Image (spheres, rainbow, N blue to C red):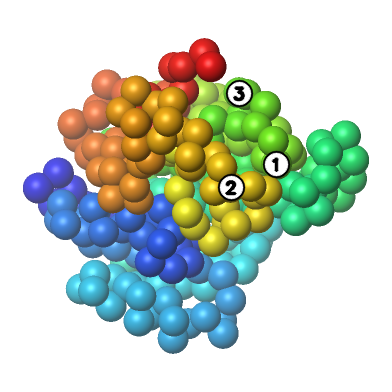
Amino acid sequence: MLLENKKILIMGIRNKWSIAYGIAKSAYENGAKLIFTYVGEDNKSKIEDLISEFEGSKAYVLDEASIDEDVKNVFTKIKEENGKVDGIVHAIAHAFTEDLHNDFIYTTKEGYSHACDVSAYSFVLAARTAKEIDMLNENASLVTLTYHGSTKVLEGYNVMGVAKAALEASIRYLADNLGKEGIRVNGVSAGPIKTLSSKGIKDFGSILNIVEEKAPLHRNVTITEVGNVSTFLLSNMSQAITGQVIYADNGYNIMGV
């Protein structure tokens, strides 16, 4: 099994339709011990029920993943109770609904800052905090989630595309900074998937139809497939890969029209 005896922290699990859940399932089936963060103390029972199938897993509330002190407190508690981890999966992103529904030019300063803080800075913060408190084992791997809207204009993605572009640049700089310590940093750019977050994108169903029509494999990707790509990046099988964005979209990104 690719992740046997490895401890993986997955940040941002929400429900069984989320990409984070797909990653968790793949990692668990490949031998990983799982640790989760989630938003909202009132979601505790729901999250505990969700992760109950992952024997031995633990979950911690982290309401503000872009607030330095909050992340340090939660990561410190995780390390104290579980020891060091071998990988971190960052599955956190958010933008205000109005900034997704309106034309990008109408994005407010508050909306712009919020999307970048939650969707991009939170990954930098997680990496820095883990390094500073010595939370990462040797040869640890960090993985975050991005999307094709970071490089192409996709209607309805708007400020989230800007935030994901910042996230992808952060992957490269973090890979350089952490590489000297043998830590790898990569991103997975998943094709469109029906998740709670995707409901905020206008005409999301039409995006799924277009990908199915145009992608070389003529189908949409699943959370299981994205999970398997992420497991590979978390494993020792990908030791020569860092600073990369790996597309898991059935080839849609290579098409010109």
Lower sequence index among marks 3 and 2 = 3
Q: Secondary structure at mark 1?
A: loop
Q: Identify residue for label 3.
A: 151
Quadrant position of residue 226: top left
Instruction: Give the farthest residue toward the left.
Output: 1
Q: Nearer the viewer, residue 115 or 138?
A: 115
Residue at 75% over, 56% down: 97
Kindly identify the amino acid type of the residue bearing the numbered disc 1: Gly
Q: Residues within 10 Å of mark 1 (few under 14, many from 20)?
A: many
- Horizontal and vertical percent for residue 194? 47, 54
Q: CA distance from mark 2 to mark 1?
A: 9 Å
Q: Is residue 205 visible?
A: yes
Circle 2 SS class: helix
Residue 156: assigned label: 1
Q: Amino acid at mark 3?
A: Thr
Q: Residues within 10 Å of mark 2 (few under 14, many from 20)?
A: some
7 with respect to 122 (left or right)? left
